[in-house]
Amino acid sequence: MSTERAVPGPAPASPSMEDLERRAAAAGPAYGEDALIVCDRLVRVFQADGVEVQALQGLDLLVRPGELTAVVGASGSGKSTLLNILAGLDAPTAGSATVAGCDLLAMDSRARLRYRRDTVGFVWQRTSRNLLPYLTAAQNVVLPMRLRSGGGLRAARARAARAGELLDLLGMADRSERRPGQLSGGEQQRVAIAVALANSPSVVFADEPTGELDSGTAGQVFAALRRANEELGTTIVVVTHDKAVSSEVNRTVSIRDGRTSTETLRHTSTGEDGEESTTTREYSTIDRSGRLQLPPEFTEPLAIRDRVLLELRPDHIEVRPDTHGPVTGA
């Protein structure tokens, strides 16, 4: 038996900084590098009567600066859980979430308060949560600015001017001295949008902002949201169960079973004759693990249930139903 020992070779050289930079460039930009809101494989598990319920099951979502996006889902889809996480009111069981560079999992109570005051604004469905009934519309808009910046005559004048500009932008300048009880539901929500915009947040979250309004009044509220998005450049995310919202925004993300399932994108273009036309396309989303949810309207007519056959073509992927039936023994 040989007693010779293998002589170890030289240790591999550590990669140089140039090698690391080259590898990073070849891998492409980091996930969500250009996004304002980054949700990466979010999982949220709740305990209900001793049973674990997964409200979010690896959800991925990117929202870029300046977008007006609707997140749509039926009851139990996970949209409310997602909103609570983005609002800093809840934390995921696994995964990560950042908004405007703020790591929502790493914040303490003081950082969360500062986040809700400075970085984000909120428009809730119930007007009683948005406005104080004993203050006028203008005073309601001034309040979050006052809580942030304190006193001083010059600061007070700047706050009053800012409130007037926002109310004028949203078509509420002539209602500035009225209290919420003297305003219609739609007018209250437009004032609430002004309150949410008061401290120039990076993003405004609107939770079912038209849920208590008729269609005509709801259209006015969405027009106000679009105006804030277009003229102020504020990123706005509307969370709702109403699929009709997709006609009011440029991007709609649908959530089903705790994951994003489809996106609807609207593009407006002007033809050679000067007339505008709008094109709407629905896309299925693929998460970071490569999973794809096929909508029921595509799977049910072909009786697709357990598995599909994939075939790669030069410019597309074919998805075909399984035609072989169950596998039986020889």
Image: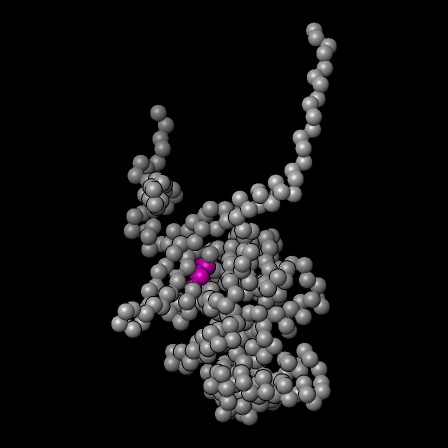
Residue 180 percent coordinates (x, y) = 54, 88
Residue 225 at least partly seen: no
| Direction from residue 132 to residue 304 in the image, left or right | left
**Which quadrant holds residue 178?**
bottom right
Is residue 210 shown above or below 69? below
Q: Position of residue 306 (x, y in %)?
A: 39, 43
**In the visual, does 164 lie left or right of 298?**
right
- Going 71% across and 63% down the picture, which residue do you hit? 108
Is 270 covered by the magenta stretch?
Answer: no
Residue 297, position as x, y percentages in the image: 33, 55
Q: Residue 162: which quarter of the image?
A: bottom right
Between residue 198 and residue 222, name the one nearer to us.
Answer: 198
Looking at the rendered image, the quarter that the N terminus falls into is top right
Q: Is residue 255 magenta?
A: yes
- Residue 220 drawn at (x, y percent): 42, 80
Residue at the image point whose x is 50% and y is 68% from the top: 66
Secondary structure, magenta segment, majority class: strand
Span colored in magenta: 252-256
Farthest residue, direction top: 1
Extreme residue toward the left, this view: 273
**Residue drawn where x is 54% and y is 65% of the image:** 83
Q: Is residue 9 visible?
A: yes
With respect to residue 70, does 323 lie above or below? above
- Classify residue 136 as left or right of residue 316: right
Quadrant containing the C terminus is top left
Asked whether 211 or 109 is in front, the reply is: 109
Which residue corresponds to the image point at 50% horizontal and 70% vertical from the top-left? 236
